[in-house]
Image (cartoon, rainbow, N blue to C red):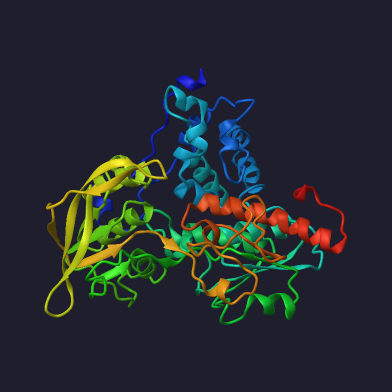
């Protein structure tokens, strides 16, 4: 029986080798491995995996196509719901979504849905599979702010509906967090990100870079002067958080956002580029999420002894299990139940260490995780030259502060309907990290797709047009 076949392992670079380079860690499946893994799928009548996919990819159908070696068909099935399969197959937390719901996982290993999606996305790119032809344009313009996962997903769906869509991107390259936030060794930029952004452009979506909405142009100008019928805000959450402890203004304290942007978008890891990036001999990364893992593994590849400092136990680490496993294999040190209380500096104003206090776990907090409590008198110092704060991010207030009628919550996130993305101002929709705060790529894509359907319904109702199938 198919479910008796063990899960097909994925080949990876040797830890000692990959810890010294920025080449991709996982090699992915070849055709034979993908077909064998696909035969494990039970093709459930009520696929729970699809229910747990934020963009509702037709998972059993594409996997059955892979099992039958109909790779082009698999690529086209996925493209109905996602134009970023190579991205999602690499960075989505499948273990808590589609794979977490797989019935095979109840008594064994779930189908490797993410690795199969990656295989299909890569195969499609390498074999020239292009998005299906789009319908004739209806003459109505929609603006999308931000070219990250939410913006790309929203723009793609709107283009498929016939709208003329233009994305406004603040940076000089499209892709948002895919481009500046996720390291090359997890998500290759030119080979994967740029190619999948190009697929969105093939739908007729225009992307204008170096446009800071709220400064270069305002949302009101887009709607009142440039004739956009609706606006989707998918500008992400790029404003870093700090601990507000003594010494945070010392030279050598940086946010994970700045550190990863320099390394990724500005290619500081590549000797042919002049972007400065300093890691010294020892780096301490404060935090336990995926961004913290990306930062600490990047620092190690740049030549530093790198350490994670996290105030809870390993059980509470929010990062993906795979990323933690890879970090440990690469020699990253983990200081658990440890919380910084002061950044220590030398006479020249540079970081020389991190004063910490030991923690123990108390009662669960609102998230269900046990709250860390300080152990009095347990302070100790960690020697380091650089401290990277990976404590989460919040949306930049530029758009909300320059646009009348947009409400934000206490965290600075835009207030929007969770089903439609409708904000407190008619015609303006939002989704992804701009609404939720820092979350995952696939959740942002799901929000973008939901908003696209709601934008279509809003425009049709306003213009007295017949309701489209996608808006029902």
Residue 307 in sight here:
no
The image position of residue 318, as x and y in percent, is: 37, 46
117 or 418: which is nearer to us?
A: 418
243 or 277: which is nearer to us?
A: 243
Q: Is residue 19 above or below residue 396?
A: above
Instruction: Give the side of residue 265 with respect to residue 362, left or right.
Output: right
Residue that appears at 42% across and 32% down: 8
The image position of residue 100, as x and y in percent, is: 48, 34
Residue 71 in sight here:
yes
Instruction: Give the side of residue 398 with respect to residue 306, left or right.
Output: right
The image position of residue 228, as x and y in percent, is: 73, 72
Residue that appears at 55% across and 59% down: 435
Q: Is residue 251 above or below residue 338?
A: below
Residue that appears at 28% across and 64% down: 388
Q: Quadrant of residue 284?
A: bottom left
The image position of residue 96, as x and y in percent, is: 46, 39
Instruction: Give the side of residue 433 with respect to residue 185, left or right.
Output: right
47 or 224: which is nearer to us?
A: 224
Q: Quadrant of residue 353?
A: bottom left
372 or 389: which is nearer to us?
A: 372
* Count of numbered circles on the image: 0
**Residue lying farthest top?**
1
Q: Is residue 440 above or below residue 68?
A: below
Q: Is residue 321 above or below residue 230?
A: above
């Amino acid at each position: 029986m198919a479910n008796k076949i063990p899960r097909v392992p994925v080949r990876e670079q040797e830890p000692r080798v990959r810890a010294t380079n920025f080449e991709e860690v996982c090699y992915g499946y070849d055709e034979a491995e993908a077909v064998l893994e696909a035969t494990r799928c039970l093709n459930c009548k009520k696929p729970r995996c699809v229910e747990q996919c934020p963009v509702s990819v037709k998972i059993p159908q594409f996997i059955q196509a892979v099992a039958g070696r109909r790779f082009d068909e698999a690529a086209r099935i996925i493209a109905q719901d996602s134009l970023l399969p190579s991205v999602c197959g690499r960075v989505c937390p499948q273990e808590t979504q589609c794979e977490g719901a797989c019935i095979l996982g109840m008594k064994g290993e779930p189908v490797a849905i993410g690795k199969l999606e990656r295989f299909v996305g890569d195969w499609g790119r390498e074999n020239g599979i292009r998005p299906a032809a789009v319908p004739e344009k209806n003459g109505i313009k929609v603006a999308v702010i931000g070219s990250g996962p939410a913006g790309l997903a929203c723009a793609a769906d709107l283009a498929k509906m016939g709208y003329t869509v233009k994305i406004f991107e603040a940076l000089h390259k499209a892709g948002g967090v895919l481009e500046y936030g996720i390291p090359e060794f997890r998500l290759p930029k030119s080979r994967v990100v740029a190619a999948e952004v190009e697929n969105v452009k093939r739908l007729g979506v225009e992307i204008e870079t170096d446009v800071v909405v709220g400064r270069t142009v305002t949302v009101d100008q887009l709607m009142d002067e440039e004739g956009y019928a609706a606006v989707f805000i998918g500008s992400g959450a790029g404003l870093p958080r700090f601990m507000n402890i003594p010494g945070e203004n010392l030279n050598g304290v940086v946010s994970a956002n700045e550190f990863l942007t320099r390394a990724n978008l500005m290619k500081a890891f590549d000797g042919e580029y002049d972007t400065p990036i300093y890691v010294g001999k020892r780096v301490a990364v404060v935090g336990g999420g995926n961004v913290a893992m990306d930062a600490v593994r990047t620092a190690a590849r740049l030549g530093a002894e790198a350490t994670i400092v996290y105030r809870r136990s390993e059980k509470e680490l929010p990062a993906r299990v795979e990323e933690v496993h890879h970090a440990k294999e690469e020699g990253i040190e983990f200081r658990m139940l440890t919380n910084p209380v002061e950044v220590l500096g030398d006479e020249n104003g540079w970081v020389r260490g991190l004063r910490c206090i030991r923690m123990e776990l108390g009662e669960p907090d609102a998230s269900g995780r046990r709250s860390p409590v300080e152990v009095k008198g347990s302070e100790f110092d960690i020697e380091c030259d650089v401290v990277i704060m990976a404590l989460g991010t919040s949306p930049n207030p530029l758009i909300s502060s320059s646009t009348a009628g947009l409400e934000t919550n206490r965290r600075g996130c835009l207030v929007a309907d969770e089903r439609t993305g409708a904000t407190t101002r008619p015609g303006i929709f939002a989704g992804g990290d701009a609404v939720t705060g820092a979350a995952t790529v696939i959740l942002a894509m799901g929000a973008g797709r939901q908003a696209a359907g709601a934008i279509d319904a809003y425009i049709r109702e306003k213009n007295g047009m017949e309701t489209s199938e996608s808006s029902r």
